[in-house]
Amino acid sequence: MDTYAIEVSGIHKRYGGVRALTNVSLKIRANEIHAIVGENGAGKSTLMKILSGAVIRDSGNIAIFGKPADITNPITSRALGIGIIYQEFSLAPDLTVAENIFLGDLNDGRSRLLVPFKDLFRKAKLILDRLGFSVDPHRLVGTLPVAYQQVVEIAKALSRDARILILDEPTAVLTDQETEKLFAVLSGLKAAGTSIIYISHRLEEVFRISDRISIMKDGELVTTRQTGDLDKNQVITHMTGREFATLFPKREKIEIGEEILRVENLAAQNGVHDITLKLHRGEILGLSGLIGSGRTEFARSLFGLDRVTHGDIYLKGQKTVIRSVDDAKRNRIGLIPEDRKRQGLTLNMSILNNMTMANIAGILRYALLIDRKRERARGEKFVDSLRIKVGGLDNPVSSLSGGNQQKVVVAKWLNTESEILIFDEPTRGVDVGAKYEIYQLMNSLAERGYGIILISSELAEVVGMSDRVAVFNEGTVAGELEGVAVTETEIMRLAIPVSNHHLGG
């Protein structure tokens, strides 16, 4: 007879008039890695928040290891042995790694003078070593790269002796190598008796790490199956109600045009050096490499965010100096950043304002007043051409799904008449259906003659979407791949550093 770590039955949850969960019943076995997949809005996060005590269910029953449980807040959830790691970090940047891991212990009313910090750092190092990540427990969390902040979140959950661990997109900011380490840790935790709920949009990971898969759609549980009894196409069809012939759509026509960008021996204040590469119209150039290899730093330098200290930039054959974002905009370069919510959008502003804010001059009348009719016409054009799903242009951009928010950032830069678009981790945190639409959008832009730079930690994405790939390693381009040479194996061969030096991201 199976032992279940979690049994939920008949769970319902509404937010006003919106049904978030409808009659959801699910069983998570002890000692298993159970993946839960579904598009954004499918109900995955709501169900996990109910288990973590962040949201209270309207009706339904929960049992933890066979005993009825009434989870009404995070404290009762933790007391039942449930630990959850959200996509959005809950870390204190001005505290050390060790202090963040044991933050609950530091908030128990004792004076900091009475906290045994030596013991704290020792315990933190033990947990970090168990995870296989070399992170100094004395280091301030705010100084860590994003990937290592994720590691601290995982360590924090493990420090509370969680018997059930819920991970929400845990590898979204990890490289392939770091993901492999995480998988080894999860396998070890499973062998030691921990039940793991694994939420991810990355189906390759789901099939590798999980024992069973539950698929959700529109607030309902569609099916739960053994992982070996499913394939990717079946999962995608259950998730979306649509069939995809391939995860990476092919362009109808590939016409590589004139050289639109060339950099020679570029170096920047952020540590990148000796970078030489080029980009053509109609081309998707993939930038790959480990986190800290210099991919994003190069993009920041090209976009005027970080100072170039050496080398030359040529746009359409003309030598160009880029010292600021305004310089980049004038030279028709746009950046869709990896953190769209903090760097690409103003969340409390409307969808329309976010689309037009980077080029106010383009919608001015008499050089003084905003022409609201012209602004709305532009917004409607982008909604139509980019297929952005909106309730209304005046709604806050925060009301959109991740995939549609990403399209709004693209619209913002198309509105500046950008000809070179840098996509930095464009599909991070979006579901498989939205990913496909973003890929289609990138292909469409390339077909229209834009030069596309794709930065991604997902090797399959780089291989599936790029015409050429420049592989970064220790701040410079280690090599370029083209045609049949663009494989995950060849990318990793060039990406693995010979030393331990890394940049920040």
Image: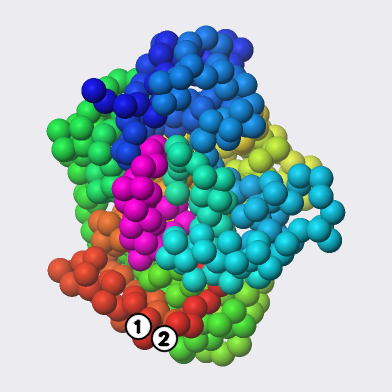
Could you say which quadrant of the image residue 235 lies in?
top left
Q: In this view, does 203 lie to the left or right of 13?
A: left
Of residues 396 and 419, the one drawn nearer to the viewer in this rendering = 396
Could you say which quadrant of the image residue 326 lies in?
bottom right
Query: For the point 61% across and 35% down, which residue is it?
Result: 398
Instruction: Kindly check if marks 2 and 1 are in contact, taking CB atoms under 8 A apart as contact.
Output: no
Does the magenta run of residues contain 419?
Answer: no
Q: Can residue 250 be seen in this view?
A: yes
Residue 84: where, in percent of width, then height?
52, 40
| Element carrying mark 1 | strand
Q: Which of marks 2 and 1 is nearer the N terminus?
A: 1
| Element carrying mark 2 | loop
Amino acid type of the residue tagged 2 in the rendering: Ser
- On screen, 272 above or below 355? below
Residue 98: where, in percent of width, then height?
64, 61
Q: Can residue 430 be seen in this view?
A: no
Q: Which mark is residue 499?
A: 2
Q: How many marks?
A: 2
Query: For the point 56% across and 45% down, which residue is it?
Result: 160
- On screen, 129 above or below 246? below
Q: Residue 215 carries which label?
A: none
Q: What stretch is highlighted in magenta?
A: 171-197
Crowd rating for badge 1 (residues with CA inside 10 Å; few <14, some 14–19, many 20+): some
Q: In this view, does 370 lie to the left or right of 446?
A: right
Amino acid type of the residue tagged 1 in the rendering: Ala
The quarter of the image holding the N terminus is: top left
* Residue that badge 1 annotates: 478
